[in-house]
Image (tube, rainbow, N blue to C red):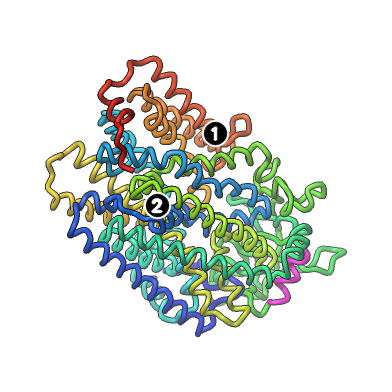
């Protein structure tokens, strides 16, 4: 079995030996710290009520624990893989795309935090479906909430496993032990249908290491392990970004130079995924298979009237069989900016170039927006270049949608709601709002600057842009002769993914154990049984996600946007109505959830048929599905409530007229 996707050669610079060893040591120390926290957390489980402690930490989180676990959970793998990928691909416009994220703490914590915590304490709820079931006295509604959480979170969990594996893979590139182990794994799984289909043995090994580590510490330690590892990971994330920012600006020649160079950039031409590309011909036949790795550079003679050679980068690995000289439809991108071409050619000795080949039958597509003369400077002004949209990446109507999406969708995320049920008092909530807002400012705006600099420093990464964060970390530190520092910098995105995966794992397992089994199947289950099932559910769900991630979806940030907007469209209206509107009943809240989910899903499915991709949703009136979904959800909830009987008086009394509050 031969793996053709050689990720070790995908980046311009790999770790020097000393840097590689330091990266491995950094990872081992980091992993050991995670397991120490899990062990300490497990000791707490033995002294308190298991179900409340394992899934909610006994509602005892203080300011730093609450603020950093909230921030770290929201700053997922998408923040350090998908978001940098978007910045790299579309330029400065991403500052507008992410701009409202700074007000997420105000919307999420300030809008529903105190009230949700009160309702959860009054009902004794431990999970979000618990709150929904008890607030509306409807087991069926609680099970509906469980179904949607499992549906959406399963998508996101797989995407996060992929992100963690790609980051770890870059961290360990160049480590001899890692490479030899990957080779051994490739031989061991050769011929096995599922495992041998992974995109590379290095990716598979990293998936196993990452998956086993995060599943074990989450299973063993529960909510407290998740919270305190989130605190550690949140600190690692912000330190990594703060270190990368001056390095990126300095090596790119300053912000003024970066913006000036970006203003001259034009998007690459790319192969159609299904047809087209280039034909490669060897100068002479080879007696062995010639592997053409993803990330390899290929040059060809200049076009007539130019002195600059054509420069292509392979985006999908292929091979030329032994004894043959030609392979057709090689998937590549072609650089079109002179400065980018000269930058790559100037460091040819550090890049992976495929020599002794010629290029013919060039069949590549220009971007739908960004290449024409009237669109010059697309990387520095709106709406930003787009491969598929003639209106650009972020037209004004879509910018408005995303402003509301980030600010509002965070409020509708069950993973965030669980944390809002766990803080200890109102002062903790108030102080945490400011803490998280400052934290997000220290993360997201610097990321925009760093990865605009990456466009200048690392041209041609569009084909593997989900890996631009670790690639940039390696590049920056190697250039200053401090390869060991890359271990810390790459730990930042790795920490982001771990902090999200552990939270999602616990959210899904609590849905099955607490909301399905204990609340509906066996209410009298002993604590010993619940403990065993909690461990088993967390382990099985994590293992299943790891298996699916062997052949993961391609676009991480698209999945994260779909899940985030879908959860908000489904959960925000029912929760807001349940917390603040006395008149709302179970039928109205269910109508809101069904309406929001159905419209949101319908727009994505329509996008599949109209635009050719599920992740390019149909945009009614040019608005994102979350805007339409939320509108339908709130309206349908209101109408159904008004058309049906009011809730029982004792239910309203319990949640709206209790004079003594718990927070």
Q: Nearer the viewer, mark 2 or mark 1?
A: 1
Residue 393 percent coordinates (x, y): 66, 46
Specify the quadrant that holds the C terminus: top left
Main SS of the magenta part reads: helix
Q: Is residue 424 above or below residue 28?
A: above
Q: Secondary structure at mark 1?
A: helix
Magenta segment boundaries in residue numbering: 338-347
Instruction: Tell whether 120 sits left or right of 253.
Output: left
Q: Secondary structure at mark 2?
A: helix
Instruction: Tell whether 538 sits left or right of 604.
Output: left
Front-lying residue, 385 or 399: 399
**What number is the disc on residue 359?**
none
Could you say which quadrant of the image residue 197 lies in? bottom left
What residue is at 41 percent from the left and 75 percent from the top? 183
Q: Is residue 513 above or below residue 497?
A: above
What residue is at 39 percent from the left and 68 percent from the top? 205
Residue beneath disc 1: 627
What residue is at 49 percent from the left and 47 percent from the top? 105
Residue beneath disc 2: 157
What residue is at 69 percent from the left and 51 percent from the top? 365
Q: For residue 320, say whether it is visible.
A: no
**How far is disc 2 from disc 1 in space, using C-alphas?**
24 Å
**In the rendered structure, does residue 345 fall within the stretch colored magenta?**
yes
Could you say which quadrant of the image residue 538 lies in? bottom left
Residue 71 percent coordinates (x, y): 46, 54
Residue 122 percent coordinates (x, y): 27, 37
Cβ atoms under marks 2 and 1 closer than 8 Å: no
Q: Is residue 41 above or below residue 604?
A: below
């Amino acid at each position: 079995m031969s793996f053709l996707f050689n990720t070790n050669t995908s980046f311009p610079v790999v770790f020097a030996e000393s840097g590689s060893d330091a990266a491995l040591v950094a990872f081992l120390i980091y992993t050991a710290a995670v397991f120490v926290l899990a062990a300490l957390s497990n000791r707490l489980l033995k002294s308190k009520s298991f179900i409340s402690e394992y899934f909610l930490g006994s509602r005892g989180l203080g300011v730093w624990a609450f603020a950093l676990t909230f921030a770290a959970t929201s700053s997922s793998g998408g923040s350090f893989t998908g978001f940098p990928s978007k910045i790299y691909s579309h330029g400065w416009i991403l500052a507008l795309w992410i701009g409202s994220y700074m007000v997420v703490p105000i919307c999420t914590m300030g809008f529903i935090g105190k009230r949700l915590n009160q309702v959860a304490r009054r009902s004794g709820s431990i999970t979000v479906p618990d709150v929904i079931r008890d607030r509306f006295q409807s087991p069926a509604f609680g099970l509906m909430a469980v179904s949607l959480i499992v549906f959406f979170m399963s998508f996101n969990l797989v995407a996060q496993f992929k992100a963690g594996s790609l980051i770890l893979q870059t961290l360990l590139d160049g480590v001899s032990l890692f490479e030899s182990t990957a080779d051994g794994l490739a031989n061991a799984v050769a011929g096995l249908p599922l495992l041998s289909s992974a995109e590379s043995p290095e990716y598979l090994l990293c998936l196993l290491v990452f998956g086993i580590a995060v599943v074990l510490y989450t299973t063993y330690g529960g909510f407290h392990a998740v919270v305190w590892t989130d605190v550690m990971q949140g600190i690692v994330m912000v330190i990594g970004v703060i270190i990368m920012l001056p390095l990126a600006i300095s090596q790119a020649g300053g912000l003024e130079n970066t913006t000036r160079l970006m203003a001259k950039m034009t998007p690459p031409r790319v192969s159609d995924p299904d047809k087209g590309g280039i034909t490669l011909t060897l100068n002479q036949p080879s007696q062995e298979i010639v592997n053409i790795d993803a990330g390899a550079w290929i040059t060809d003679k200049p076009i007539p009237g130019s002195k600059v050679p054509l420069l292509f980068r392979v985006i999908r690995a292929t091979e030329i069989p032994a004894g043959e000289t030609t392979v057709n439809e090689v998937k590549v991108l072609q650089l079109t900016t002179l400065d980018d071409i000269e930058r790559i050619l100037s460091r040819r000795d550090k890049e992976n170039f495929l020599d002794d080949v010629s290029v013919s039958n060039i069949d590549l597509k220009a971007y739908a927006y960004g290449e024409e003369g009237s669109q010059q400077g697309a990387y520095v002004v709106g709406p930003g270049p787009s491969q598929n949209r003639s209106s650009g990446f972020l037209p004004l109507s879509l910018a408005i949608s995303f402003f509301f999406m980030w600010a509002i969708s965070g409020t509708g995320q069950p993973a965030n709601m669980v944390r809002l049920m766990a803080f200890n008092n109102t002062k903790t909530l108030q102080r945490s709002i400011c803490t998280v807002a400052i934290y997000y400012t220290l993360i997201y705006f610097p990321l925009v600057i760093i990865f605009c600099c990456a466009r200048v420093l690392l041209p041609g990464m569009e084909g593997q842009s989900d890996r631009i964060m670790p690639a940039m970390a390696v590049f920056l530190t190697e250039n200053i002769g401090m390869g060991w520092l890359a271990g810390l910098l790459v730990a930042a995105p790795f920490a982001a993914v771990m902090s999200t995966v552990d939270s999602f794992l616990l959210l899904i397992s609590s849905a099955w154990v607490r909301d399905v089994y204990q609340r509906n199947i066996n209410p009298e289950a002993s604590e010993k049984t619940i403990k065993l099932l909690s461990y088993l559910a967390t382990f099985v769900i994590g293992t299943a996600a790891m298996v699916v991630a062997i052949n993961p979806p391609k676009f991480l940030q698209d999945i994260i946007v779909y899940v985030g907007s879908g959860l908000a469209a489904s959960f925000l209206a029912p929760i807001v109505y349940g917390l603040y509107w006395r008149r709302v009943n179970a039928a109205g809240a269910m109508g809101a959830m069904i309406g929001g989910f159905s419209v949101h899903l319908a727009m994505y499915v329509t996008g599949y048929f109209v635009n050719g991709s599920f992740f390019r949703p149909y945009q009614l009136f040019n608005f994102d599905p979350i805007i339409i979904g939320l509108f339908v959800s709130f309206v349908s909830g209101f109408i159904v409530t008004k058309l049906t009987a009011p809730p029982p008086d004792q239910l309203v009394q319990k949640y709206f007229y209790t004079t003594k509050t718990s927070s």
